[in-house]
Image (cartoon, grey):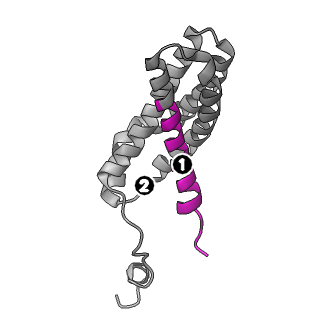
Amino acid sequence: VEGSTLQLLLSPERFPTEIQPETKCSVYGTVLLLMLDLIFDLNTVYTLMFTRNPTFAFCLMLVISRTAAQHLLSGKLCHLREVLQQSSLRGMMHGELLEMIDVHGFEAAASICLTSFSYWFCIQTAWQAAAQICSILLSICSFSLFVFHRVDVERPPP
């Protein structure tokens, strides 16, 4: 069909060539980043409880619980493997994966604040310091991923 909508959408004039497709590595890496961030945040809660800082631990646990509850109640974790496969085949993030990034964005921002502030109160060994720094860095990466998708990807072009 000469003037079909599909041809118009796929024409070189309409398709942005500067956008690189998502690779399998980037899709799986995104989910790995989100999971590692949650694991390191749980380690931070453990460290805070171990060093007798229950207020910080409680606040961070509330934030983590909110994120975990949203992931579990949405039911999207049940078919995460299919979503990852579809995202890597299509070359762009699946909508459900983008929703997971959005949910995790709040947790990452709160985790950066709480972990950074409580760092000086709970570090007793070099391993704890290294784990806390990794937690802060992973939260920064997760938050930057959230901001990137919120601002750069979802924003309509001018």
Residue 99 seen from this side:
no
Bounds of the magenta segment: 134-158
Residue 21, percent from left and from top: 36, 63
Q: Is residue 48 above or below residue 86?
A: above
Which residue was labeled with disc 2?
93
Q: Please name whichever residue, 129 or 77, is drawn nearer the observer in this view of the structure.
A: 129
Disc 1 crowd rating (10 Å Cα; few below 14, some 14-19, many 20+) is: some
The amino acid type of the residue labelled 2 equals Met
Residue 28, image quadrant: top left
Residue 102 is situated, as x and y percent measured from the top left of the image, at: 56, 46
Find residue 132 and report its horizontal and vertical position in percent: 51, 26
Badge 2: residue crowd in 10 Å (few <14, some 14–19, many ≥20): many
What secondary structure characterizes most of the magenta part?
helix
Look at the picture and state if 84 lies above or below 77.
below
Report the quarter where the N terminus lies.
bottom left
154 falls in the magenta region: yes
Residue 13 lies left or right of residue 60; in this view the side is left
Residue sitting farthest toward the right: 55
